[in-house]
Amino acid sequence: MSLYKNLLAVLSASCLVLSGATYASVPDFDMGTVSVSGLPSTVVHPSLSLDINGFDFDSFTLDLVFDPNALSFLSGASTVVFNGVTQPLAALPSYSESAGVDINDGAWHVRIGSFSLASVPVAGQLALNGAFKIADNAAPGIHQITASGFVSTGPISVCEECTFGGLVAVTVVPEPETWALWLGGLGLLAWRRKICIN
């Protein structure tokens, strides 16, 4: 499969050279992530970024998969950094969003539809700073958000639906009261054991 992708990349680059377009190479869409932690009932801001520097940007589509019993996506509080400017995610042109259970895998998906910034040269990274609310009754531990999608570049498409993917972790920290109860329980067990030994 990688040989096939490499051949397509060479063909695309050759077409661009022949057409007079000047692109360095097919972009690297490795996704960088920043994981976060927080208490139940709080809002956390994990982030992901793609280096699409130097390429005209056509569209971006993102699929977020997570446990809706532990997390909820707050699109109104999420932002995107594009060309060094931070703006609300939902304010991007042609932005759309849908959420629900996918019939193919049975998992909960939030799909951020293709938003278009046609023929805008990109300087730096495209970064999404998502806002997620941790549920009141979220179990302590690590809850993963699987992020995947594709990017199209233009005006002569170097990369039509180049895919990317990765994982972002949200660690739910137990409430202080939970720690106090847990430590108190251990203390009672130790005290009871001491009495039984004597």
Image (tube, helix red, strand yellow):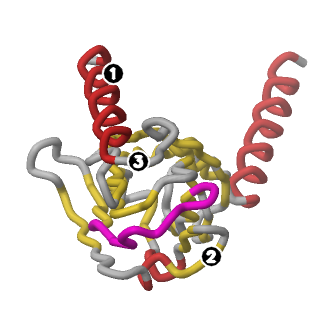
Q: Residue at x 47, y 47 (%)?
A: 22
Task: Please report the bounds of the magenta region as a residue range.
Answer: 113-125
| For the residues bearing labels 3 and 1, Cβ distance under 8 angstroms | no
* Kind of element beneath mark 1: helix
According to the image, label 3 marks what residue? 147
Image quarter where the C terminus lies is top right
Q: Residues within 10 Å of mark 2 (few under 14, many from 20)?
A: few
* Kind of element beneath mark 3: strand
According to the image, label 1 marks what residue? 6
Q: Which callout, 3 or 2, points at the residue further toward the start of the chain?
A: 2
Magenta-colored stretch includes residue 124: yes
- Label drawn at residue 197: none
Pick the front one: 33 or 103: 33
Q: Is residue 97 above or below residue 27?
A: below
Q: Is residue 12 above or below residue 109?
A: above
Distance from disc 3 to disc 1, alpha carbons, whole Å, reads: 24 Å
Distance from disc 3 to disc 2, alpha carbons, whole Å, reads: 20 Å
According to the image, label 2 marks what residue? 86
Tell me which amino acid carries mark 2.
Thr
Pick the front one: 22 or 126: 22
Q: Which callout, 2 or 1, points at the residue further toward the start of the chain?
A: 1
Q: Is residue 174 above or below residue 115?
A: above
- In the rendered image, residue 147, in percent from the top left (x then y), is placed at 41, 48
Image quarter where the N terminus lies is top left
Instruction: Give the dominant element type of the magenta stretch: helix, strand or loop.
Output: strand
Q: Residue at x 63, y 56 (%)?
A: 124
